[in-house]
Amino acid sequence: MKKIFVTFLALVMLFSLVSCQRPERYNDDADIDVVIQKGLAALNDGIEYAEVEDEEFYLSDFFTMPEWVDDAEIFTVKTQAAGVGYNINEVGIFEIEGKHTSEMQNKLRSYLSESYETNKDWYDSYMPEETPKLRDAEVKVFGNYVVYAILSKDDRATFFNAVQEELLKK
């Protein structure tokens, strides 16, 4: 009898915890330029970033931009800050229509993987401290936004947290 009561009590507690969780609701109308700027500002890394003018051309060696991408922003390092040295920092955000976020996530993961395989020997030879950034680059989905970052581990976490925080604003 005690086992049944304890099991019942455990199930009640489990279901109460599950029912209390509120799924995160992202702002579907966010201005992606504002979102990515908030993410870059949070880095506070002394690096000046520049917007890629033609995202479709920039990624054309890896994939054709799908028609279900409503908007996209990619930023790369513009100039090297004093004492920072050369780096491969890059971030991007894509606003996706419909249910295509997993498809875009896969396209970006493939882009990052191909870029790593293509460039790792060069980076290892000339900028070995940068290779882990590309190898460990991440892609995350926040609602109908797909975001990627080629940054150091700590900078990626900072960037993604700032992006998520901005996308949660209503």
Image (tube, grey):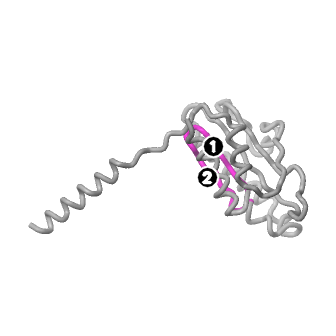
Q: Whole-percent x and y of residue 157?
A: 64, 58
Mark on residue 157?
A: none
Q: Residue at x 88, y 58 (%)?
A: 81
Q: How far apart are marks 1 and 2 (CA)?
A: 14 Å
Q: What SS does tag 1 mark? A: strand
Main SS of the magenta segment? strand
Q: Find residue 168 and report its image quarter.
A: top right
Q: Quadrant of residue 87?
A: bottom right
What residue is disc 2 on? 161
Q: Are marks 1 and 2 in contact (CB under 8 Å)?
A: no
Give me the disc on residue 146. 1
Question: Of marks 1 and 2, which one's residue comes earlier in the chain?
Answer: 1
- Residue 138 is inside the magenta segment: yes
Q: Position of residue 50 (x, y in %)?
A: 84, 45
Of residues 89 and 158, the one drawn nearer to the viewer in this rendering: 158
Is 147 part of what is drawn in magenta? Answer: yes
**Alpha-carbon neighbours of circle 2 within 10 Å: few (<14), some, or many (≥20)?**
some
Which residue sits at x=82%, y=41%? 52
Q: Give the range drawn in magenta.
A: 134-150
> Residue at the spot x=70%, y=59% of the render?
155
The mark closer to the camera, 1 or 2, is 2
Q: What element carries label 2?
A: helix
Q: Position of residue 141 (x, y in %)?
A: 58, 46
Q: In this view, does 15 lie above or below 27?
A: below
